[in-house]
């Protein structure tokens, strides 16, 4: 891995300052309003088309790089603890992932907790995946990708599809995945993540779970059976509170016979990929995601 960049060092300081002044006990509505306000400052790439539509009653958005002949679809599941929603900072990252993968992306705006707790978001993910299949997209041309809580939902979607006997996608990408809503991993207490507090993460997890057991495998894939899942790429930062979630996911998946690539980026915080294209580490991470997607889908087309 490259030496942490100057941009990364500066951004780390800014994130630590934001973390120190943020009231992490504020209601969800406050965080949603802040995210919506920040949308106006996030510039989307001009060489990508964004087209909203409905898929199986789920609001989705095609994100399509211009001038690319699409053979594959990145089915993207956003993060935000299952509570915050779909905003431009994540839309921008998905656009760069689509460009790196020479693919188009279908990003879903699933129902949010606490208004719609588990399993609403998972049902929306499954519905959107089946919508893709029913509209002529082969399963082997789909790569499910999710960040943070979206990584959790990506795994839950894969396990649900497998258990139902449905066709599985070619691969999956989990970025800073949250795999244990109980927060039992060592890094929840030992890592000082500049981007997010453990208290906030566990609060969002409780709201997402509703009155369900947070150790249920479809809520916390750490406790689930991973056998039969497609190849996984896992990216996580070395300073993240969910570092243990990612490393334990990789260990459990390998033990279950799953093809896994785990990449730990030194000195990176939760979901640092969001800062593409300005952060060099984010650019490199997105490039690696694109390579993984191309390799996994091209191999199946031959």
Image (cartoon, rainbow, N blue to C red):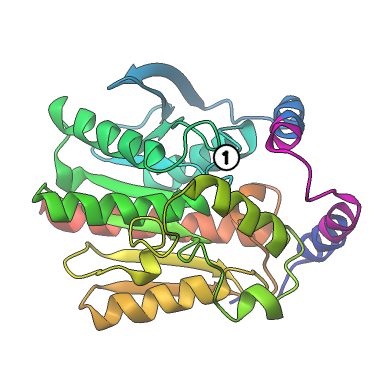
Quarter of the image where the C terminus is located: bottom left
Residue shown at 64% from the left, 53% from the top: 203
Left or right placement of residue 19 versus residue 89 in this view: right
Q: Is residue 14 visible?
A: yes
Q: Position of residue 141 (x, y in %)?
A: 20, 44
Give above or below for 146 relative to 235: above
For the stretch drawn in magenta, the main secondary structure is: helix
Residue shown at 23% from the left, 38% from the top: 71
Left or right placement of residue 131 versus residue 25 in this view: left
Residue shown at 62% from the left, 32% from the top: 88
Is 212 inside the magenta-drawn segment? no
**Residue at mark 1:** 83
Asked which quadrant contains residue 64, the reply is top left
Q: Where is residue 93 in the image (x, y as percent from the top left)?
A: 56, 43
Crowd around label 1: few <14 · some 14–19 · many ≥20 (10 Å): many
Nearest the viewer among 203 and 133 is 203
Asked which quadrant contains residue 129, the reply is top left
Quarter of the image where the N terminus is located: bottom right
Give above or below for 198 relative to 107: below
Is 29 inside the magenta-drawn segment? yes
Nearest the viewer among 145 and 280 is 145
Left or right placement of residue 224 versus residue 107 in this view: left
Asked which quadrant contains residue 128, the reply is top left
Give above or below for 247 relative to 212: below
Magenta-colored span = 15-32
Q: Position of residue 19 (x, y in %)?
A: 83, 56
Q: Where is residue 138 in the image (x, y as percent from the top left)?
A: 14, 39
């Amino acid at each position: 891995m490259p030496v942490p960049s100057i941009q990364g060092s500066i951004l780390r300081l800014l994130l630590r300052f934001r973390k120190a002044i943020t009231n992490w006990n504020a209601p969800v509505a406050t965080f949603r309003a802040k995210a919506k306000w920040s949308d106006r400052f996030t510039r989307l790439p001009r060489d990508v088309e964004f087209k909203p539509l409905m898929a199986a009653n789920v609001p989705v958005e095609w994100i399509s790089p211009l001038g690319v002949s699409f053979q594959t679809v990145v089915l993207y599941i956003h993060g935000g603890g299952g509570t915050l929603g779909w905003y431009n900072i994540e839309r921008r990252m998905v656009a760069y992932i689509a460009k790196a993968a020479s693919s188009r992306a279908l990003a879903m705006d699933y129902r949010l907790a606490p208004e719609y707790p588990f399993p609403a978001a998972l049902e929306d993910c499954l519905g959107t995946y089946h919508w893709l299949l029913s509209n002529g997209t082969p399963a082997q041309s789909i790569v499910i990708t999710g960040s943070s809580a979206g990584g959790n939902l990506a795994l839950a979607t894969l396990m649900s599809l497998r258990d139902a006997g449905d066709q599985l996608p070619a691969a999956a990408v989990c970025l800073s995945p949250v795999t244990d809503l109980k927060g039992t991993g060592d890094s929840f207490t030992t890592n000082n993540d500049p981007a997010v507090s453990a208290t906030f993460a566990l609060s969002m997890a409780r709201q997402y779970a509703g009155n369900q057991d947070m150790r249920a495998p479809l809520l916390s894939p750490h406790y689930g059976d991973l056998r039969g899942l497609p190849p996984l790429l896992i990216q996580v930062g070395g300073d993240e509170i969910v570092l243990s979630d990612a490393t334990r996911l990789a260990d459990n998946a390998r033990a279950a016979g799953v093809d896994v690539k785990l990449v730990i980026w030194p000195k990176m915080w939760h979901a640092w990929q969001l800062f593409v294209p300005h952060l060099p580490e984010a650019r490199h991470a997105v490039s690696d995601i694109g390579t993984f997607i191309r390799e996994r889908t091209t191999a199946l087309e031959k």
